[in-house]
Image (cartoon, grey):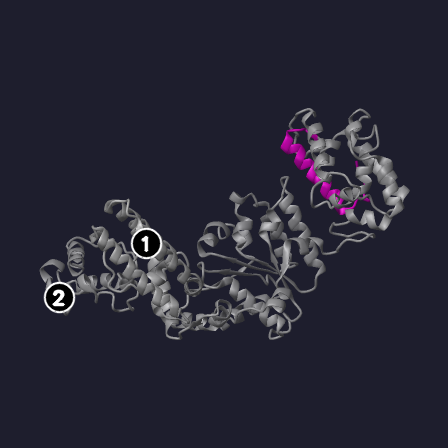
Amino acid sequence: MDFLNLKESVKSCVQIAKGFAREYGNGAYYPAHLLKALMHKDIGLKGFISSLGKDTGYLEEWAEVRIDDLPKGKADGEVGADESIAAVFEEADNVRLKWGLLEINPVCVVTALARPGIGFSIDELKSFPLREQEIHDSVIADKDLNVSFAMNDEDGGNLGGNSMASLLKYCIDRNADIQKQGVAPVVERDSEIRMMMEILGRHSRPNVLITGDSGVGKTALVEGLISGIVEKKAPSFLLGATVYELDTGSLVAGATYKGEVEDRLKGIIKDLRKSERAILFIDDIHVLLDPKQGNSGAVGILKPELSRGDLTIIGTTSVDEYRKIIEPDQAFSRRFEVLELNEPDLDTASRMVNAVVGRYEAFHEINVAGESVPECVSLAQRYVKDRKLPDAAIDLLDRTMSAVKMINETAEGNIQNLFEQIEVVESNKKKQPPQKVSELKLINASMQNLLGPVLMGELTGNQDTDDLDSYVEWLDYLQQSLTVLQKYAENGVDVITAHEIAAVISSKTGIYRENSGRREGASFEYGRYSSPPGGWAGQCPEITGGCHSGVTKRNESCRSAHWFFLFAGTDRNREDGIGKGSCRSSL
């Protein structure tokens, strides 16, 4: 079979059919594989079949039954075509001539398969829902409408379709998104944006790879670049550029045969060539290149395009993934210039959070006290370990505002419900005090779970419930607690302060609020953390051997939430004494 006048969708159909042949263990692909491939969502034939009132699901099952009856065998190299495939395409070409088309489209192929003796026997076609004449009559009756259902491929053809189909299907136009929805201002990153523009303005290899830990703002940096392009605040070589973000989820979803992801990527690159000044943005580019994800073939497609300079890419990845996946592939990594994005310091992060806090205030309809932002940043840096600033602080603030908004809307009702539950227990004269204590303990657990950390944090000088034994003690405790909380809930919270933020971080980490809310530099001001003037290192020279700096550095490190230390040194360097002195300074 060697037809040059095949639509791109039909060529894709052949590749999908070969993939099905490999999957089912057949040595070649047959008309049944071709029929199943025609039902693939990327071919665009399902709409036409549905317009005829036929069930596409039944057609797919019909093809699978025929595939199960085919002989098994392993192909040597490339999966070839069975002899019957040539007859199918010859008949499809006859259909094309009959309809006056320039190329064979999927409707021509399915019409050929419906003809007895071409792809399937007369007996097999008795249960086939489509009839050759039925398709022919439908196309002739309304040719432009019906045939256009099959034209959803890359080149579009002469009867409809979109010339940028792959780009629109698997990519997102970020310029259009930012024009419509806007973007939060990117502050304190002018140097990084300038360097990114300089790289994109290069004559050769204008590709940027932004590396940084999770939360430092890699995606936000790209959004700042796009915002500059949209607002015409970019240099001339970027004005008019369109940034398309690759939707890796859509690219991989629904891939049914080996190599389909690579074929889709080829279609995207083909469309990017047609678009003037197009930039492809791949967020978490390591996902596309990771062999464990089954997408390693994408590297072979991107390398030649990058080397020729036909493609401009902005990629983002974490430092660990860059070193593990991208950097070992020198042929790929050297086609990018790496732009490292570091975590900002506390003051810079505070300014970044202040720049976006207005958007969150408008969304939650709650104000944020200005002095609480630095405290939020400090707490996030100290206790949120899964991401870096400023994203960690923004997430913490967002979570706190959501918790407070929920208190304002639901706390009064929940407290009233808890009061009613206590009244039910109190009015029940049949149950003995031990039984009532058990029920009050359940109500106490419900109070903790329903009201949340922000509201429960208002119980200053909270009594330890482990000390409560009798029914009267439990009853008094719950009634007094709910009375205090009810007054707080009635007043509501209009402004977020460091108090609410500390309560949320305390709930997330399990660290007591008085410890989580203490300021930097005051880590050892509470109870058992206090030490004599000059520190225990000065008080215990016989233990530390005069290594004051060792104990001091260890104590300064303990400002984080969790710590582990390995003291290393040569013989008689008193590393054991530093450890003992550090322990004594904490007791």
The answer to which quarter of the image holds residue 547 is: bottom left
> As shown in the figure, which amino acid type bears the numbered disc 1?
Ile
Residue 379 is marked as none
Quarter of the picture holding the C terminus: bottom left
Q: Alpha-carbon neighbours of circle 2 within 10 Å: few (<14), some, or many (≥20)? A: some
Q: Earlier in the sequence, mark 1 or mark 2?
A: 1
The answer to which quarter of the image holds residue 56 is: top right
Please report contact status of discs 1 and 2: CB closer than 8 Å, yes or no.
no
- What type of secondary structure mainly makes up the magenta span? helix
Q: Alpha-carbon neighbours of circle 1 within 10 Å: few (<14), some, or many (≥20)? A: some
Look at discs 1 and 2 and give the one toward the viewer: 1
Residue 21 vertical placement versus 138 (above, below): above
Residue plotted at (9% across, 60% down): 542
Residue annotated with mark 2? 538
Q: Is 10 a magenta residue?
A: yes
Residue 450 at least partly seen: yes
Residue plotted at (58% across, 52% down): 248
Q: Position of residue 305 (x, y in %)?
A: 64, 54
Residue 482 lies left or right of residue 168; in this view the side is left
Residue annotated with mark 1? 422
Residue 533 lies left or right of residue 421; in this view the side is left
Instruction: Give the extent of the magenta segment.
Output: 1-28
- For the residues labelled 1 and 2, the Cα–Cα distance comes to 57 Å
Residue plotted at (37% across, 63% down): 380
Residue 223 vertical placement versus 86 (above, below): below
Q: Is 222 a magenta residue?
A: no
Q: Position of residue 17 (x, y in %)?
A: 70, 37
Q: Position of residue 390 (x, y in %)?
A: 43, 66
Quarter of the picture holding the N terminus: top right
Q: Nearer the viewer, residue 400 or 224?
A: 400
> As shown in the figure, which amino acid type bears the numbered disc 2?
Gly
